Image: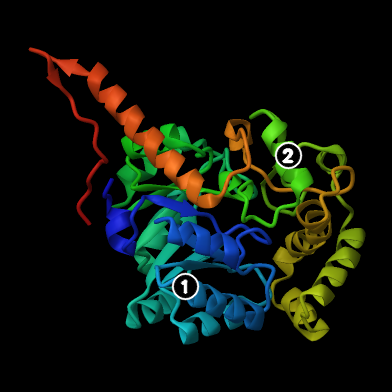
Amino acid sequence: MKTRITELFGIEHPIVSSGMSKVAIPELVIAVCEAGGLGILASASLTPDEARASIRRIREKTSRPFGINITMKTPFAADMCRMVLEEKVPVVNMSLGRDARFFAAVHAYGGKVVNTVTTEKHAKAGQAAGADALIVTGHEAAAHGGAVTSLTLIPFLRDAVDLPIIAAGGFADGRGLVAALALGADAIAMGTRFATSLESPLHQNIKHAAVGNSVADTLYSVNFDGLPCRVMDGPEARRQFKRPMTLVKACMKALIVSRWMKVPLSKVLRMIWEEPGEFRMRAHWGAFGIQARRGIEQGDLEHGISPIGQSQGLVQEVLPAAQIIRNVVQQAEEVRARVNASMTAGQGETVVLRPVSHSA
């Protein structure tokens, strides 16, 4: 199953493990890469030094291509970019922003850049900035999915840009992979499915809850971290869904999180001074870290909040990442064969379903 994404990154399968904060750790990245997919390391909750150590741990265990996610709204974004250039990470996934000069610097050492987008405006901006591919995130996704569902967003942006597309949001099995290819994507990114894998550090309580939940057991609101965000339905999530945290309380919690992440108070104050318009969002985003830690790391179903996608309803069991990839590929081949067999034209001629090809 060769696509523009498998050729671009030099991977075996058009399957990507999303750079989920606190979840996409080296062990998960290594397992996905070794199984023929592309694993993306999360760096949003790490310092640059911690991310560097994670990169080197990945390289000790696999010689295959891997990626790292850089979230541009974090305090360490600029330092993280410098570190990534020093380490020459093969694939860099930038979210919540883009930087043409940084993209060019990645290209200078032979790396590839993927920009995460949710709208036509951002997709075109990513292409103009020099991205090699896009992760297009639909409404179904965990955390910061867009306002439009993948079913319509993927083909819409396929017509708007020429770059290879990795479809994210609602994809958890081989049926989703075939559907994404039919819509014009070149690969899928799975967050929730890999978050519920054996190698994922997501607490067992949350994994088991996700396996037992349906596709409807999530909440989507700006009240959680200041951006439109999808999380697992639960007591704390319902409380914040109905009434957001006050700004004062959010600021107090955000300062606690900044100490966890070893962010100097001077840097926090400078961010507030330089970007006052984003102050509220940054405060709530920081405060969200406490609830996320209780959910993701401690498995507190009462007081924690855990980002999760609607595709949790498609997850039936916790499996090793390699088995998940094998299952997706096998099911995709079976679905493609079934669809091809049922689509006949004229004198019994079979219409073969293949990935959509677009010239760059």
Mark 2 vs mark 1, foreground winner is 2
Tell me if I can see residue 79 in this picture: yes
Mark identifier at residue 265? none
In the orientation shown, which residue stands out farthest toward the top? 347
Which secondary structure, mark 2? helix
Which quarter of the figure is the C terminus placed in? bottom left
Image spot of residue 297 (x, y percent): 78, 57
Q: Could you say which is closer to the camera, residue 49 or residue 197? A: 197
In the image, residue 320 above or below residue 111: above
The type of residue carrying mark 1 is Asp
The type of residue carrying mark 2 is His
Image spot of residue 13 (x, y percent): 36, 51
**At x 82% / y 38%, what residue is drawn?**
234
In the orientation shown, which residue stands out farthest toward the left? 347
Image spot of residue 138 (x, y percent): 52, 42
Q: Which residue is mark 2?
A: 208
Residue 10 relative to residue 18: left or right: left
Q: Which residue is mark 1?
A: 99
Which secondary structure, mark 1? loop
Task: Please tell me how crowded label 1 is: few (under 14), some (14-19), or many (20+) other residues with Cα within 10 Å.
Answer: some
Which quarter of the figure is the N terminus placed in? top left
In the image, residue 244 above or below residue 60: above
Q: Earlier in the sequence, mark 2 or mark 1?
A: 1
- Residue 90, image quadrant: bottom left
In the image, residue 1 above or below residue 99: above
Q: Could you say which is closer to the camera, residue 276 or residue 27? A: 27
Tell me if I can see residue 220 in this picture: no
**At x 57% / y 38%, what residue is drawn?**
140
Q: Could you say which is closer to the camera, residue 303 or residue 251? A: 303
